[in-house]
């Protein structure tokens, strides 16, 4: 982003970059969705013939993982819509709503896998095609690992926590696919109950994954932010010439875009034009130095009245001209 761009051009450039990231994220989802569906379908065919509860639990979960790509795809598509009067901040938060759906799918898949495993415990059946079942477990591991690596790598590049989390989810699923091998080993050694027990173990692992995903999603929905991000914003803003102090730093994620607010203190004798120029420089340097920043709002304070204590309602009532007359009209 060149320094010569005016504010309107910078806004357009940022919007273009956000749209490009959303398109790339959509492409990642579609490619990984195809990979997950192929893996799950191969496992489902083998599961039908083998009768393995552990493989069935893993197959159900893999189909659930594939379905989680759909709400994310819809969210990325909606996030590309420009802001409007109804939604002045855009629709980036639809990614968080998609995250809720993902958590629901994870929990549901855990319930189905657990139910099937308990059924096999109560009504044992003989497994067949042990070698093919073992191969299916390895296929599940390989498919999940390929998808996981792709999603995590692209999620970090695009700044999408949802993609990274989904990739980590897929990586954990690959490990659960390997657990199916324990069930095959049990059947081969003459301990058929080991298979549904492994299925229950996979169910527990799925629930732990759901818990971690829920924490991430709800943190984002409650505008949670990594503390180190706020520290970086303050450090970077303080490097701009003319900035005497930085306070009230806030940031939140809107989908895979970071929105930042902060106050900077400047010399009292500066003109409005010079103060505005410093604010532009702070905005500009944050857009360059931090990844995935969508918007930056900079409030300028005179250095002797800088800080959150000068922005309270009580302080504004005392310092704003005409505050007493305004209060009298409102109360009267």
Image (tube, helix red, strand yellow):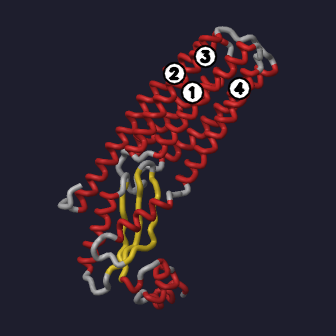
Is 332 rendered above or below residue 95? below
Coordinates of residue 134 in the picture (x, y in percent): 61, 16
Task: Give the labeled residue for mark 2.
Answer: 39
Task: Give the labeled residue for mark 3.
Answer: 134
Report crowding for label 2: few under 14, some 14 to 19, many 20 or more residues within 10 A (C-alpha).
Answer: many
Q: For this view, does 274 lie left or right of residue 210?
A: left
Q: Nearer the viewer, residue 207 or 236?
A: 236
- Eye-nearest disc, 4 or 1: 4
Could you tell me how far apart the alpha carbons at marks 2 and 3 are, in whole angstroms? 14 Å
Coordinates of residue 124 in the picture (x, y in percent): 79, 16
Q: Earlier in the sequence, mark 2 or mark 3?
A: 2
Q: Residue at x 47, y 38 (%)?
A: 72
Report crowding for label 3: few under 14, some 14 to 19, many 20 or more residues within 10 A (C-alpha).
Answer: many
Could you tell me how far apart the alpha carbons at marks 1 and 2 are, in whole angstroms? 8 Å
Q: Which image quadrant is residue 1 in?
A: bottom left
Disc 2 secondary structure class: helix
Disc 1 secondary structure class: helix
- Image quadrant containing the C terminus: bottom right
Q: Earlier in the sequence, mark 2 or mark 4?
A: 2
């Amino acid at each position: 982003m060149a320094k010569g761009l005016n504010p309107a051009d910078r806004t357009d450039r940022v919007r273009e970059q956000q749209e490009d990231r959303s398109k790339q994220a959509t492409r990642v989802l579609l490619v990984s969705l195809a990979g997950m569906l192929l893996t799950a379908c191969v496992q489902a065919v083998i599961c039908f013939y083998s009768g393995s509860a552990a493989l069935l639990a893993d197959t159900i979960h893999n189909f659930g993982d594939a379905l989680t790509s759909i709400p994310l795809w819809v969210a990325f598509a909606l996030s590309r819509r420009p802001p409007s009067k109804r939604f002045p901040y855009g629709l980036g938060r639809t990614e968080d709503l998609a995250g809720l759906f993902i958590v629901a799918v994870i929990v549901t898949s855990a319930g189905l896998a657990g139910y099937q495993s308990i059924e096999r415990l109560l009504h044992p059946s003989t497994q067949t095609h042990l070698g093919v079942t073992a191969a299916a477990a390895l296929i599940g591991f390989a498919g999940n690992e390929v998808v996981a690596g792709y999603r995590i790598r692209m999620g970090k590049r695009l700044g999408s926590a949802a993609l990274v989390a989904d990739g980590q989810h897929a990586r954990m699923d690959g490990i659960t696919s390997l657990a199916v091998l324990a069930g095959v080993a049990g059947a081969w050694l003459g301990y058929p109950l080991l298979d549904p027990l492994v299925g229950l173990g996979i169910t527990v692992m799925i629930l732990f994954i759901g818990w971690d995903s829920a924490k991430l999603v709800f943190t984002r929905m409650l505008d949670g932010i990594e503390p180190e991000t706020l520290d970086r914003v303050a450090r970077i803003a303080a490097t701009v010439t003319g900035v005497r102090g930085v306070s009230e730093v806030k940031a939140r994620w809107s989908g895979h875009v970071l929105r930042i607010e902060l106050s900077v203190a400047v010399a009292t004798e500066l003109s409005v034009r010079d103060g505005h120029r410093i604010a532009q420089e702070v905005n500009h340097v944050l857009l360059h130095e931090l990844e995935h920043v969508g918007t930056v709002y900079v409030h300028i304070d005179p250095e002797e009245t800088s800080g959150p204590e000068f922005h309270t309602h009580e302080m504004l009532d005392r310092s704003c001209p005409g505050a007493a007359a305004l209060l009298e009209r409102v109360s009267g």
